[in-house]
Amino acid sequence: MFGDDARTLVTTSNYDELMWTSDFVLRHISKWFQENQFVLNADKTNTVQLTQNEVSYSTFNLMYDDHVLPETDTIKFLGL
């Protein structure tokens, strides 16, 4: 579905659509990790909301493996 390029940016102006699409993408990523015998470390995985203005959205509670992925303002890319 996403092709060989696994980078995914979810964009929308609707909060409900953002939650639905983000959940869908995370399930797809989880399936890929399982099929390729990788483990996504939920303790080191965060979400980031990038907005064009200072609009404050509701808390972004994206779930993975029974963990809420915390939202952060900064990120650190980790190597494999």
Image (cartoon, rainbow, N blue to C red):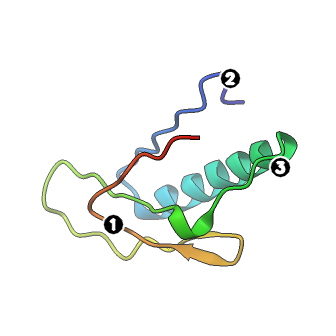
Say left or right for 47 vs 43: left
Distance in Å between CA atoms under marks 1 and 3: 26 Å
Say left or right for 11 vs 64: left
Task: Please name the amino acid that badge 3 sits on.
Answer: Gln
Residue at image position (43%, 60%) is 47
Q: Secondary structure at mark 1?
A: loop
Where does residue 66 sit, x and y in percent of width and height?
69, 78
Task: Please name the amino acid that badge 1 sits on.
Answer: Thr
Outermost residue to the left: 54
Graded by Cα atoms within 10 Å as few (under 14), some (14 to 19) or many (20 or more), the crowding at tag 1 reads few
Mark 1 and mark 3 in contact? Answer it, CB < 8 Å: no
Distance in Å between CA atoms under marks 1 and 2: 28 Å
Q: Earlier in the sequence, mark 3 or mark 2?
A: 2
- Find disc 3 in the rendering and name its residue: 34
Mark 1 and mark 2 in contact? Answer it, CB < 8 Å: no
Graded by Cα atoms within 10 Å as few (under 14), some (14 to 19) or many (20 or more), the crowding at tag 3 reads few
- Which quadrant does the N terminus fall into? top right
**Image position of 28 with respect to 44: above or below:** above
Residue at image position (36%, 58%) is 48
- Find disc 1 in the rendering and name its residue: 72
Outermost residue to the front: 80
Mark 3 and mark 2 in contact? Answer it, CB < 8 Å: no
Graded by Cα atoms within 10 Å as few (under 14), some (14 to 19) or many (20 or more), the crowding at tag 2 reads few
Distance in Å between CA atoms under marks 3 and 2: 17 Å
Where does residue 57 sit, x and y in percent of width and height?
30, 69
- Find disc 2 in the rendering and name its residue: 3
